[in-house]
């Protein structure tokens, strides 16, 4: 049995118009290839949820895929604002919900745990409670101060990129770990994209690194370089130049349309996209091996 299919088939089969889609990954392992495939297939009226929308949701909003964005920080990391998401929100063209980072992760944890909500400590940014009526306060049943509660988030689809997985979706990821596990367990369906597809024995050799178990995965897609301009620890570096370039591109509606035409609609898949980037970019993003020490799990 295998869950291995193409990314285009996975998006076509599992992402429907009006779905809530959570593209996981915090700075690292952001599934840009899946976002581009959603754009390419012209999915519409999506609710896009992410702890940090990053450029992936700027591009999807520009392409007309979204009716709402849920986030806990919005910006082009290290550069400035996400011009396209922010502009759509300010013009009233895009619904939105904002949380603290911990609020967003708590929502996913509630969803993953099968709970309707979870409590959390009060946050310093109390204006979030004024802007978002879904953030509420309840008395501590044990007599302490009030606690903040946030509702569970159960996306229709979570998209997770990993370094390696077997054909059934058992997956290893390492480096900066974001909310991948929580998003996957909270979601109704999980699409997994991977730099490498490996034999089950490779996954079984290091069970503690198996953050995503195959039993919750619906589709596995072999998509090398899937998170450019983000990065995959051990495979390629973050493309900081691209993040700077996007700030310029996103300042012009005409340039955004031209970029989407060339880099999303104008390529068939991620392989063509990576080849189009060219040898200079490939070399600039190349990383040197830095191996961890081996672990002895013992034998019995």
Image: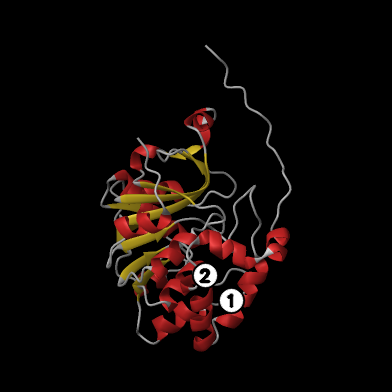
Q: Are marks 1 and 2 in contact (CB under 8 Å)?
A: yes
Position of residue 199 relative to residue 107, above or below, is above
Could you tell me residue 204's position as x and y percent?
Answer: 49, 28
Q: Which image quadrant is residue 132 in?
A: bottom left
Residue visible at 54% across and 81% down in the picture? 250
Q: Is residue 144 left or right of residue 193?
A: left
Q: Is residue 239 left or right of residue 131?
A: right
Of residues 121 and 207, the one drawn nearer to the viewer in this rendering: 207
Q: How is the image coloured?
A: secondary structure
Real-space Cα distance between discs 1 and 2? 8 Å
Q: Which mark is residue 150?
A: none
**Helix, strand or loop status at disc 2:** helix
Position of residue 205 relative to residue 76, above or below, is above
Residue visible at 72% across and 44% down in the picture? 289
Q: Which image quadrant is residue 107 in?
A: bottom left
Residue 155 visible in the snapshot: no
Where does label 1 land, which residue?
Answer: 246
Of residues 243 and 136, the one drawn nearer to the viewer in this rendering: 243
* Earlier residue among tags 1 and 2: 2
Could you tell me residue 2's position as x and y percent?
Answer: 37, 38
**Helix, strand or loop status at disc 1:** helix
Q: Which mark is residue 55?
A: 2
Residue 30 visible in the snapshot: yes
Of residues 142 and 196, the one drawn nearer to the viewer in this rendering: 196
């Amino acid at each position: 049995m295998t869950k291995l299919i193409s990314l285009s088939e996975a998006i076509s089969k599992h992402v429907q118009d009006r779905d809530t889609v959570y593209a996981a990954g915090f700075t690292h392992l952001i599934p840009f290839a899946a976002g581009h495939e959603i754009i390419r297939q012209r999915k519409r009226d999506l609710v896009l949820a992410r702890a940090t929308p990053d450029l992936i949701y700027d591009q999807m909003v520009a392409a007309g895929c979204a009716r709402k964005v849920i986030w806990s920080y919005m910006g082009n990391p290290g550069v400035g604002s996400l011009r396209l998401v922010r502009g759509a929100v300010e013009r009233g063209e895009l619904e939105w919900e904002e949380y603290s980072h911990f609020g967003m992760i708590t929502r996913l944890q509630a969803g993953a745990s099968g709970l309707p909500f979870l409590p959390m400590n009060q946050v310093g940014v109390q204006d979030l409670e004024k802007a978002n009526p879904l953030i509420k306060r309840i008395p501590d049943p044990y007599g302490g101060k009030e606690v903040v509660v946030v509702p569970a988030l159960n996306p229709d689809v979570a998209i997770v990129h990993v370094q390696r997985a077997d054909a059934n979706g058992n997956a290893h990821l390492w480096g900066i770990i974001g909310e991948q596990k929580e998003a996957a367990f909270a979601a109704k369906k999980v699409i997994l994209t991977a730099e490498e597809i490996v034999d089950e024995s490779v996954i079984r050799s290091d069970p503690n690194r198996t953050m995503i178990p195959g039993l919750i995965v619906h589709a596995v897609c072999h998509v090398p370089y899937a998170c450019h301009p983000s990065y995959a620890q051990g495979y390629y570096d973050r493309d900081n130049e691209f993040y700077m370039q996007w700030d310029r591109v996103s300042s012009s509606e005409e340039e955004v349309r031209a970029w989407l035409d060339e880099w999303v609609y104008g390529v068939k898949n991620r392989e063509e996209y990576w080849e189009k980037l060219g040898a200079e970019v490939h070399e600039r993003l190349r990383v040197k091996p830095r191996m961890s020490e081996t672990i002895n799990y013992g034998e019995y």
